[in-house]
Amino acid sequence: MTAGRRTAAGLSALLVGAGVAHLVRPEPFDRIVPRALPGPARHYTCASGIAELGVAGLLAIPRTRRVGGLAAFALFVAVFPANLQMAHDWRHARPRKRAIALGRLPLQGVLVALALHAARADRLRQV
């Protein structure tokens, strides 16, 4: 298995887990939806869960892996404001919670880079 395929498989598994979590236990995700967004937080939580499952599917199929990587990139960028909201909300929380919230910020950059790697690796394989 190539590095790009491993990256895509890992991201796909991560996104399945996250998507299921958003849909099965939405409350923690509802709390980090930025309050500036219009409408109920639950709509955003469910929409992101569904998007995560869809992107996971795109990454899992070789024929759609490139678009899946690009979709994962867009998804990871789109949900970054929720991570910022969590970091802001938890700024006075216990040290462990603060560390989790702050640790998610650079992790999002890693996920963005991995998504681009999955998209590019597939493109390079086709050349």
Image: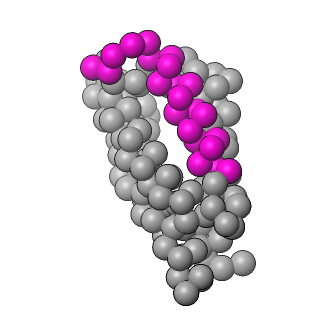
Q: Tell me if I can see residue 38 in this picture.
A: yes
What sort of colour scheme is used for the picture? one colour
Q: Is residue 46 magenta?
A: yes
Residue 53 percent location from the top left of the image: 64, 41
Towards the viewer: 127 or 99: 127
Residue at x 53%, y 29% (from the top left corner):
47
Vertical arrangement, residue 46 with respect to residue 56, above or below: above
Above or below, 85 relative to 124: above
Q: Nearer the viewer, residue 33 or 126?
A: 126
Point out the stretch of residues depicted in magenta.
36-57
Give how far across and how far down residue 20 sits, in percent: 67, 33
Q: Is residue 91 left or right of residue 20?
A: left
The N terminus sits in image quarter: bottom right
Q: Main secondary structure of the magenta part?
A: helix
Give left or right: position of 6 versus 111.
Answer: right
Residue 23 picture location, percent across and down: 64, 26
